């Protein structure tokens, strides 16, 4: 397993629509495992393949409450699709590709997601609260959408300005 570099916005690779996985091959399984290791190291509660420069429809999520105690409940999904949703929730989100910035985002409170697990078997996952929010956030990444695309234009432009400044300072 490997820890992969995470792309930081603004980056055009984060704005592309990722392509569907035809089959969960050993290469896709390796990507899923590397993404999990990258997410735990960050640390984060989710990660989408475009964030590590791979434009394929793969996400990983782990929102286990006892993660600090070493409890892991990893979810690895290819081609995730929301097939049902209910209710509304506002969540203060962050993003590993938008460091040091959080904002309230309107999401669905409950989602049912269908996808392929690491064995290539079709599964359905029901989620509420942070788990549901995280699935929606990661599926957005597969469609080239960042959480800052859900906030006001003024706030988004301020966030992007800060990111550009951070990148310029890092590069100098
Ligand atoms: O996709 C990403 O960039 C990961 C992102 C997911 C996410 C966070 C919050 C709401 C929705 C989606 C993160 O994991 S940011 C880091 C974070 O929230 C966190 C990190 C460690 C412990 C708990 C939370
Ligand atoms: Zn994100």
Image (tube, rainbow, N blue to C red):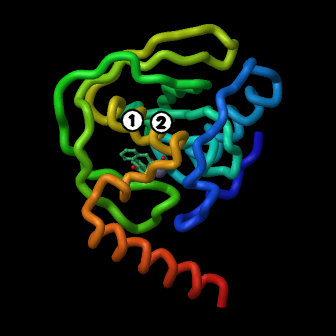
Rate crowding at label 1 as few (under 14), some (14 to 19) or many (20 or more) other CA atoms within 10 Å.
some
Judging by the rendered image, the residue that carries numbered circle 2 is 139
The residue at 61%/17% (across/down) is: 117
Q: Quadrant of the N terminus?
A: top right
Q: Quadrant of residue 169?
A: bottom right
Q: Residue at x 27, y 72 (%)?
A: 154
Which quadrant of the figure contains the C terminus?
Answer: bottom right
Give residue 104's position: percent from left, percent from top. 23, 54
- For the residue labelled by badge 1, is the local secondary structure a helix, a strand or a loop? helix
Q: Is residue 45 left or right of residue 116?
A: left
Residue in front for this viewpoint, 3 or 97: 97
Which residue does the numbered mark 1 point to in the structure image?
136
Report the front residue among 91 and 14: 14
Q: Nearer the viewer, residue 156 or 5?
A: 156
Do the residues bearing badges 2 and 1 touch, measured as CB atoms within 8 Å? yes
Query: Which one is in front, 41 or 78?
Result: 78
């Amino acid at each position: 397993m490997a820890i992969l570099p995470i792309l930081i916005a603004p980056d055009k690779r984060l704005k592309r629509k990722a392509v569907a996985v035809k089959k969960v091959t050993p290469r896709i399984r390796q990507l899923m495992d590397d993404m999990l290791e990258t997410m735990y190291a960050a640390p984060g509660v989710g990660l989408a393949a475009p964030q590590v420069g791979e434009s394929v429809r793969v996400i990983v999520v782990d929102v286990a409450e006892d993660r600090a105690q070493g409890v892991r409940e990893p979810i690895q999904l290819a081609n995730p699709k929301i097939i049902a949703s209910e209710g509304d929730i506002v969540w203060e989100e962050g993003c590993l590709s938008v460091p040091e910035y959080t904002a309230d985002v309107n999401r669905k409170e409950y989602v049912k997601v269908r996808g392929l697990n690491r064995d290539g078997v079709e599964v359905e996952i029901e989620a509420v609260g942070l788990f549901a929010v995280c699935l929606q956030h990661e599926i957005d990444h597969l469609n080239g959408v960042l959480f800052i695309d859900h906030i006001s234009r003024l706030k988004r432009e301020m966030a992007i300005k800060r990111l550009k400044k951070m990148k310029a300072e890092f590069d100098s």
